[in-house]
Each structure stands twice: as C-alpha cells, then as structure tokens.
Amino acid sequence: MANDREVLREIWDGKIPVCFTLNSEEICDLQGPDPFYLMVPRLSYFPLCTEKVRKHFIRHIQSDSKQEHEMWLEFNGIPLKWHYPIGVLLDIYFNDIQLPWNIVVHFDKFPENVLMHCQNKEIVEAHFLSCIKEADVLKHRGQIVSSMQKKDHTQLWNGIMNDKFDQFWSVNGRLMETSTEEGFKYIPFRCYTSEDKYIQRLVKPMNEEGQRKTLKHLLNEVFPDQENVTVRTHGIIPPFETPLQWMSEHLSYPDNFLHLIVVTS
Amino acid sequence: MTSNEAAVSLGVAREDINWRKDLISQLRERNRSQTNCFADLISLHNRLFENANTLRNSNMQLTIANETLRREAANGGIGMGGNPDLEARLLKQAEELAMLHKRKGEHTQQIVDLNNKLQEITKELHRKETSLAENSEANTNLRLEITKCLAREKDLESINQMLKDEHQALQLAFASLEEKLRKTQEENRQLIERLIKYKARDAEKMNEENDNFLSFTSPTTFLMHTLSKFGKRQAKMQKELEDAARDTRPVSPDRLSLKEVAGLPTAVPTKASVTFSAHEGEVFAVKWSPTDRILATGGTDRKVKLWSINKDTSENKGILVGSNAGVMSVDFDSTGTLILGASNDYASRVWTVSDLRLKQMYCCWLVIIPRFYEYS
C-alpha cells in the first residue's frame, strides 16, 4: 500500500525549469521571439504543458499554412518522444542537460520515422490509459482497471493534467493496493539502456523463499552478466536495498511503471 | 492496509530504514536544486513575460489610439483652419472629378456599343466571306461546265462539218444518179418506141395473115379472127385446132364403136344434178380438184370461186380475189393445194386452197390455158 505520502509528495512536486526556443530556421521576423521559460512537472507529458509555448511561437513562424503544422521538440538534435514522461526524458539525457533545460521548438519537417503524431491531448490520454492497463495486467492481471468506471479513468487523467495530487492518488491508490502479503503479481518496470531501447521482464516482488526482493535482485535478474549496474529514476539513484514492492508503489510514474534508466559507471 | 501491518512492515524494515532516509534526502536535494531554486525565478520570469506582453499590447493600442487621435486632430485642424481658397479649389476638383466620372461612364457605354457594332460587322463580314466562297465555288463549277460545253460544241461542229461533207458527197452522187436515171429513162423511151414500132409491124403482119385466113369458111374462123393478133405460132395452133374440129364429125361414130367394143355402159349426162349461179356474168372456166370434191370456177366478175359439191347441194367454200379482169381459166396442182387462174389482165395468179391467199403472180402477154408442171 502506497502510504508513504511524504515520498509521494516529494516525487509529485518534482518540477524542472525548461527554456523553449524557436528553431532559428523557422523564424520569419527580423527580431526573433524571446525564449519561453516554464516549470514543467516531471510526472507530466510535454503535450500537456506546451500549450502556451505553441501560442507564443506560432506568431513568429513563416507562412500561414505552417500554423496547421504539428509542434515538436528537439534537444541536442534529437527529437523528444512525447509519450515518455518528462522525468524519464530528463533522466535519459541527464548527462547532457544543464538546467534550465534548453529545448528547441519546431513546426516544420516533422520527423515521421522517429516520432508518433500527437494532434491533441486525447492521444496522450489514450496512451497513458493503455500504459496503466498494461501495468495493471502485470500487477493484478488487469482485474482492478477493468473493474474501474469511466469516471475513474477520467479522474486519473485530470489529476495528471491539472497537477492535482489528491485527485490523482484517490484513484491511483486503488491500483497500488495488494490483497495478499506477496504484493503484486509482477513488478511493472522498464529498464532504459538507451533513449529508444528498454528492457521489460517479468519480475516478482518476492523470491521463492517468501523474502522481499530488492532493487539489487531485479538488476541481477535483468542484467545477469553485468556488475555495478546502477539505475536512475526521478533524478535520484535509489539505493540497492530498496524493496521492489515499495519501489513499485512509491517510485512508479503515474502510468504505474517504474522507469529505470540504466547508468553504466 | 492497516496501520498494524504498516507498523509491522516498518518494524521489519527497521534495519532497512537507511534506504528510505537516503531516498528522501536525495529527493529533497533534487527538488531543492532543480525545482525550488528555479521556481521563483521562472514564475517571476513568467510574470514579467506576461506583463511585458500586456504592456506591449496596451502600448500598441495606445499608439493606434494616438495615431487616430492625431489624424482626427489634423483633420479637425484643417477643417477649423478653413482655407476658403483651397476649399473652393477642392470643390471644383470634386466637381471636375464627378464630370470626368460621368464622361468616363459615357465613354464606357460608347465603347460597349461600338464593340457590339464591331461584333455585328464581323459577323456580317463572315457571312459575306462564306457567301463569296460559295459563289466562287459556283463560279468555278460554271466555268468548268462552260469549258465542257465548248468542247461539246466543238465536237458537234466537227460532226456537223462531217455531215455537211457527207451531204455534199451524197448530193453529188444523187446528181450523178439522176443524170443516169434521165439517161436510162431516155433509153427506155427509145426502147419503148422501138418496141411499139416492132409491135406495129407485127400487127401489120398479123393483119396480113388474118386476111389470108379470112378465105376459110368455118365456125371456128370467128375464133381465129379474135385470136389473129397473137402471131404465127398461134395461127399454127389455130390451124391444128381447126383440123381437129374438122375431124370431130368422123370421130364420133368411132367412139360409139369403141364403146361397143369395150362393152362399157355409156351415158350421156341428161340431167343436171346441181344447178347454182356461180358468178355475176359468164363462167369461163371450171375445174375439179384432183383430190377433193371441190370445184373451182372462174368468171367475168374477176373472181375464182371454190365450191364443195355434194349429191344435191353446193356450198361456196371461198372466193379468190386479185384478178383485174375476167378469169379465163383455172387449174389445180396435182396435190390440190394450189390453184392457178389466168385472167384477161395478162397475168396468171396462184392461190393456196387452204387459206385462200394469193401466192404468186406471173405477168405475160397472154395465157390461155395455164397448166401446172411438176418440178422435181
């Protein structure tokens, strides 16, 4: 049971400063637009907080027809995947990032083969809910999500969208409940080895002897050959002794997955 | 979960409490370094950004307002200033402008009218052109026809010339022929004269001979007299006939004796079995058909008639016409299909019995007793 509200709150409050600048090739004014600074929540997605950014830059791009174009973000020449939570993206590119995070805004030349299209927030919502369902299938064989009503799903989504901790957790708490001592069936997690590759395995929170597994066990199971593998999530490096069940309950992103970025030292 | 269980789990995890502390401190450190120190700055920036935006907008609005005000003021200034000279000129210009507009309208109308007229004219031109083309075509056709006609005329002329030449040649031929004819006629006349002369001489001779015969006294002399003009041969024949006639008296007792010798019954026809009037006038000739019971008679009425004779009756079978004088003699051929008649018009004629048609006519000076001779 996710009852450690202190940890949850700290994670929820994690925000990062981002500096958006328009791609210099697309500026049509003599005097380019000012960069746009924003505090974005780590747990949110980019399409949910870039509405103002779009409004700010759309006046400065070249022709009218391009106003219909989709906005996409780029960092260090790499298109940013909107379907990863912002915190995951930050952790992936952690070594290259200096805060505030400098992100370039594009409207033209959408990288079709790298990014999925995202015309509106409904697409993000669909992706988010599908992640939650996947995670629940791993945790409770999908029983809890399927027993939920439509309004619960909407409440989850609205909690994320509007940055409402209580609204979100009143529903998410049910997803984090365990009926037995053994905890979840499997731990939903993704181990990112690079920006677009992650490993997903079936890992139980308990071993055969009924003892709680820790992060160390997980890493040994996922990377049996490699020693000294550390992971970063939420901008911190969780200790190896952290129990998996507790991690899943407290350190999961709102999509109920643990997004662990592998740090090879 | 219940608080009991939480307490138990906390108890169990007491030795592991370090990881949680570590975690929380990391999180706090993170939030402090990444969030808190930027949050104020960013919010301040955002506020400033919005302020700047609103100020920019209001500034722009003010500029616009200022501009409009200034313009109004300028307009008002001019209006107030009231330069009457300028205003009068302006009025005049406006009037002139109106005039020009009006004139422009008129011109446009005119242009439209002219354009219409032009279009009509072009149409007419087109029509004329087409008619011209048609006419020229007709013209060429006619010219062709004319050349054809001329050729035909030339042909005709040549033909005409040819005909004329022919005609001339024919006329020449005709003239020569006429000349020949005249000569021939002349010759003919001479011949006829000569003939008449010969005839006259003959006649004289005949008369002489006749005179010689006149000394004979006999019933046949009269006949001889009538026939005296038919030459010497005739006269000889006449003599023979005379001899024959002279012999009749002594012959008849011979015949009786002959009858007695033969022992045949003799009968002189005493009673006519059929009597009928055959011709209007004398009947000169009578002949039985060699094959049928058909009798042919000839008379002065210039006709030859065919009669079918039965026991008591006679029936006219046909009248053969064509003779120009009385028929003196008739005869059948051996098959009884043809009939020959000699008449006083110096001609003998042959008819067919079956269809009563005149078949042939022979002219000679005199035919007394014509006879058919068999040709093989």
Image: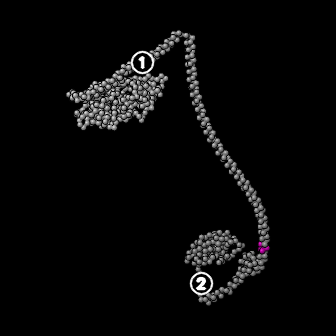
Quadrant hosting residue B99: top right
Q: Is residue B133 above or below residue B196?
A: above
Viewer-side residue, B357 vs B274: B357
Q: Position of residue A56 (x, y in %)?
A: 42, 24
Give the labeled residue for mark 2: B267
Amino acid beneath label 1: Ala
Residues under labels 2 and 1: Cα distance?
190 Å
Chain where mark 2 sits: B
Is residue B62 depicted above or below A111 in this figure? above
Q: Main secondary structure of the magenta part?
A: helix
Q: Position of residue A100 (x, y in %)?
A: 39, 24
The magenta segment is B199-203
- The image quarter in which residue A217 lies: top left
Q: Identify residue type, mark 2.
A: Ala
Relative side of A87 to B124, left or right: left
> Relative to residue B91, is residue A115 depicted above or below?
below
The mark found on residue B52 in the picture is 1
- Rendered residue at 30%/27% (across/down): B23
The percent position of residue B317, horizontal first and vertical second, equals 58, 72
The outermost residue toward the bottom is B261
